Image: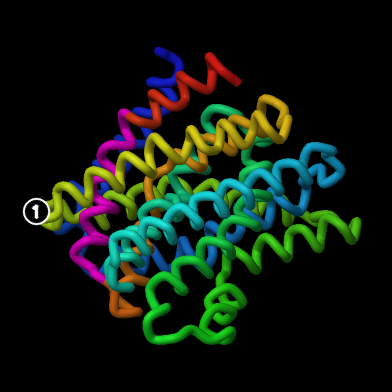
Amino acid sequence: MTDLLLALWPLFALIIGGFLLRRSGFPSEAFWPGAERINYFLLFPALLFGNLASAPLDNPALPRLAAAVLIGLGAAWLGLLLVRRLRGWPAARFGAFAQGVLRFNTYLGLAVVGSLFGKPGLTLAALMLALMVPAVNVMSVWALTAERGVSLRSLALPILKNPLILACLGGAAINLSGIGLPGGSERLLGMLGAASLPLGLLCVGAALRPQELAGEVPALGWNCAVRLLVMPLLAFGVARLSGLPTLESSVLILFFALPTAPTSYVLTTQLGGDGHLMAGIITLQTLLAAGSLLLVLAGIQGLV
């Protein structure tokens, strides 16, 4: 438990630091949108591209890991659709609830994986992202727009333009081609990638909105419980049924235990969803994850 605490607290210290920096006005309010964009479009794609370009794609457990990811997300999606039918949620609320359950904070996930499992864990996480990012994007857009009708174009465009997906595809293509990363390009990508996670965690903290927690306590409570506790239990069951090795199981469970992504707020407001509810979900899940991730990771050590 002490080792886990030592691995986690610096990551959440950066999140809190980002929140305090933005509250204090340092360096300026205009800094944070620019920092998020440079991370999303340059630094983070460099991290994913570099890891996938040198990943051991012949790992025999990868097909089972891919199947486990899709089965876990599919089961959660079917559960959400069933509850929506029973409760009669409008798309504005259902979209926020769905993103709270399905989406994940990629920066925090890769930072935790890197701290605990090193480069082999980061490689597996990058491979999982190549599947999870397009899947949860399609589900999120559909959830927010189902009442107005959804076209194939509206589902496909966010995926085709997503720099994380493009980086994963590009890295895998370089890997399969056998070209590799010559002439110091691997070091360049490594330097860019190393900057992405600390900056990403600072931006996560800067995006927190504690003022949005009022008025939706029951909804926030059950959504956080499902995302932070039920989803990792689902992933554990799928990992066991799939017969995944220890490292693959651990990374799968961890990603299903992460709080939702701060970018969920942007998508929600752009597509007419309940921004107040989404901001509250993001904030509370991120705060509670400091304790729930420690619990989940301790469970992984004992069960996997």
Please say whether residue 289 is one of the residues in the magenta stretch: yes
Where is 238 relative to 302, above or below?
A: below
Q: Is residue 256 left or right of residue 130?
A: left
Residue plotted at (24% across, 69% down) = 274
Give percent across and percent down for residue 191: 59, 49
Where is 244 relative to 82, above or below?
A: above
Residue plotted at (44% across, 25% down) = 7
Q: Is residue 123 left or right of residue 5?
A: right
User: What span is in magenta?
Assistant: 274-291
Where is 156 relative to 194, above or below?
A: below
Q: Is residue 8 left or right of residue 274?
A: right
Tag 1 residue: 214
Give percent across and percent down for residue 54: 78, 47
Q: Is residue 24 visible?
A: no
Residue plotted at (47% across, 25% down) = 297
Q: Is residue 281 visible?
A: yes
Residue plotted at (57% across, 54% down) = 74
Q: Residue furthest right?
A: 178
Quadrant in the picture for the N terminus: top left
Q: Label 1: how many residues lie within 10 Å, few (<14), some (14-19) or many (20+)?
A: few
- Nearest the viewer among 228 and 107 is 228
Please say whether residue 257 is one of the residues in the magenta stretch: no
